[in-house]
Amino acid sequence: MLLASLLVASFVIFAAMYLAPGNPIAALSGGRSLPPDSLRILEQRYHLNEPFLVQYWYWLRNVLHGNLGISITLRENVSTLIASRIWTTAGLVLYASIIILTIGIGLGVLSGLRHGALDTSTLVVTGISAAIPAFVAAIVLILLFAVKLGWFPALGNGTSFLSNVRHLTLPAFALAVSSLAIVARVTRASVREESTREHVQTAVSRGIPTRQVIWRHVLRNAAIPVTTISGITIASLIALAAVVEVAFSLNGLGAYLVGSAQSKDLAVVQGISLVLVTAFVVVNMLVDILYAVLDPRVSLGGRAE
Amino acid sequence: MTGRRNLFGAAAVAVALVLVASACGRSANTSTPTPGSSATAGLVVTSPKGTAPVGSIVWAVYRDVNSLDPIYAFDYPENTADSLMCESLLRQAPDGSIGPGIATLSTPNATTLVFTIKPGVTFWNGNPVTPDDVVYSLERNTDPKWAGFYPQVFNRVQSIEATGSDQVTITLKQPDYWLQGELASIPGIVLEKSFVEQQGKNYGTPAGKIMCTGAYMFQSFKPGVGVTAIANPHYWNPAVHPLVQSILIKGISDVNTFTSGMLTGAVQGAYDFGIPTLDQLKSNSNVKVYTGPGWSTDAFIVDNLKGPLGNVKVRQALSYALDRQGMIDSVYKGAALMPRWQSNPGTFGYGTSVFNAAYNSSPVMNQDMAKAKSLMQEAGASGQTITIGMSSQLVNIAAIAGAYAAAGKAIGLNVKLKSVSAANYINFFIDPKARAGVDGFLTVNYGDYADPASLLATFVLPGGSQNFDGYNNPKITSDLETARSTADPNKRAQLVSDAEKIAAVDLPWIPNLQPTNLLILSKNVTGAVASFAYMFAPWADNLGGTGSS
């Protein structure tokens, strides 16, 4: 399943990059004209003069031998380049996920269980923030917390664990803000729905303590749609991270993917895509496993009925 | 694709609207400088020398550095990093004049250049620079194995030989006074032969190291993080004491991110031009902006002489109809000069008084709608259509394309804009298929050293690297070819001026404006070179603290 996804994705991306106009060698020169001889020699060196399928085959054969190829712009191994950046993106996505899960689900549960001012204000705030794209959130957060208040750095990665956390705080919130709102709203809705179910009403009427009713009957059942939406939003963070990484000048995979696609650095685009597709599939697999834990009726590997 | 692009797109539309609105009715610029006065008066070539030691600073470039090998340095980030750490045989001063670098030059005759390496010049590792190192470094430029970007620079060179214990002799096929400029620029950088050979294909990549002679020495090259250079305590020139402990050259592609970096002190410096947030930076008390001479030209490249623009009167009409002052005000935020020639007056690196006198006698390219309309009438070109290649994602280019559309409309020329993505803009320069059906496109372009001929030659000489339309004016060609072989700087300046004056009327390209070079510094550091010379010669030798932190 994973291998099939990777093979299809790699072929589609390779083909798209091949068809898109542009020339990776020329991207090196920042738009100035290169001597034709230099251009020709460099094209031969990177097999750019070969037909499409031959180029793809070279690439695939290398990957099967564990070699992701060489970046044309940096003349460095793609695996090394990816390894040096993967932790930034992983850290950013993880940080944002923690924010989404704790604050998003927390707010959703609270406003789902309690009517009144908290619920209304949560609805209003999440309604607005769900509509804020990450790049707008980034600008607003930088302006407020970096330029005006000076609490957090405006750009870059840190040098130690703690300074990394500090550097990633604004990016993580920028990345999380709209997903957080969606998760909160879905959580609230499903908590509401579960609280009005017949078996919950029955449990309450049998005198079972409220706390127990909420944990065993409301939250457990509400957890299924919440898991679904959390899984989807977290998986989408992997792709969305690019925008935030550019805005905060972080050395992550997403920003690098954007840059490499622009300079048509094919091996890098392919390498990062493989990593992102893998991460996407893995996250979805984790969500499936979680379903089975939450709901014994779901069996792994079984067909939907 | 990213937030930056969306914002840029929106900003571009806004700027274009401003330009369209201001395209009509602006009065002519009436400044009339006295003959011989400097065309770049009021600009500074350097910021005041730093006096206090500084720890580490972050220096921004518009994208990550790709290579530290000078033979592949062809764009702002690579040039900035190479010129910080490496030195050339000759050296361009901040005012563009060329003098000794790590070697002195004597010319016993017009086809012989003898370089004598200055005594005591050493690489960072303490090894002396030898003639072998010099010969090897220069020949790497033309060795097909390396496929470097500068082989054409050496096309009049017969041989490069070590002719003494501290001497290298270049023999030319015919006199070439442009070569000296190139050897004071990136192609003249001297590397240690044994070190390059030992590094092999890793030289200048993130996996390898480099070996040069400058006041700042290489420490690390980490993709995504940047290039770090540290002060060289054993620099061979005792007159220079590098004051900054370490300089990180970091790629920051988003203008808003760069701006907030400057405002918050996360970034201490950068070179730029035509930056949309200039007013915000200038008005901030943490930031000091210096305006220096630029060597680049913002221009419209005519790439098709078979269409309406093949008629010189149509080119002139379009040029007269342009609201250049509007572009300078709204696109460049004032950081540009009105053009008189194709080349930027910042490039007057020699024969300065000759250049200034000739330049000041040429008219400023002011808007003149009456002339524009009568030229259109004479050409009988009313109602014809031209297509301009642009990218709505590149804010400056989109805005200037908008100004062209407005100018065309005002004189009865239909202007069609052909927009491509920012990533594909490069294809106009390299792919004849991308240029098909396009009459012209926009550029900011520069030569390798301070000489108007350096850029002009690329698009007016037959076979020039940017002569896309086969333009050929025999008088310009002969003036430039003669200039290339003329020893006397004033005579050379006169010939180049003559060529520029013809080109300013014949308009092989249509110059839009002449950007000035912006040096943007945190208020607590100073001393960087402020002119465009930073691209080709060390710019941080005098950089240091202001002492008032």
Image (cartoon, helix red, strand yellow):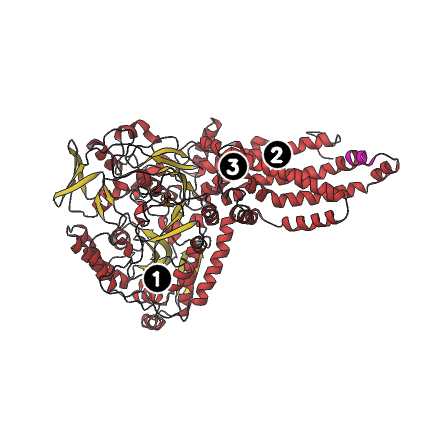
Measured Cα–Cα span from mark 1 to mark 2: 57 Å
Q: Determine which of the numbered discs, if any, sits on residue A283 in the image.
A: 2
Residue B26 visible, this orientation: yes
Q: Is residue A275 visible?
A: no
Q: Position of residue A117 (x, y in %)?
A: 74, 49
**Disc 3 target residue:** A273
| Residue A77 as seen in the image, left or right of residue B310 | right
Which image quarter: residue B195?
top left
Above or below B437: residue B27: below
* Identity of the residue drawn at 29% across and 29% down: B125
The quadrant holding residue B406 is bottom left
Chain part drawn in magenta: A209-215
**Disc 1 target residue:** B307
What separation in Å lies between label 1 and label 3 (alpha carbons)?
44 Å
Displayed quadrant of residue B247: top left
Residue under disc 1 on the same chain as residue under disc 3: no
Q: Nearer the viewer, residue A118 or B139?
A: A118
Q: In this rendering, is residue B374 above or below B18?
A: below
Please state which amino acid type lies under the numbered disc 1.
Gly
At mark 2, the secondary structure is helix
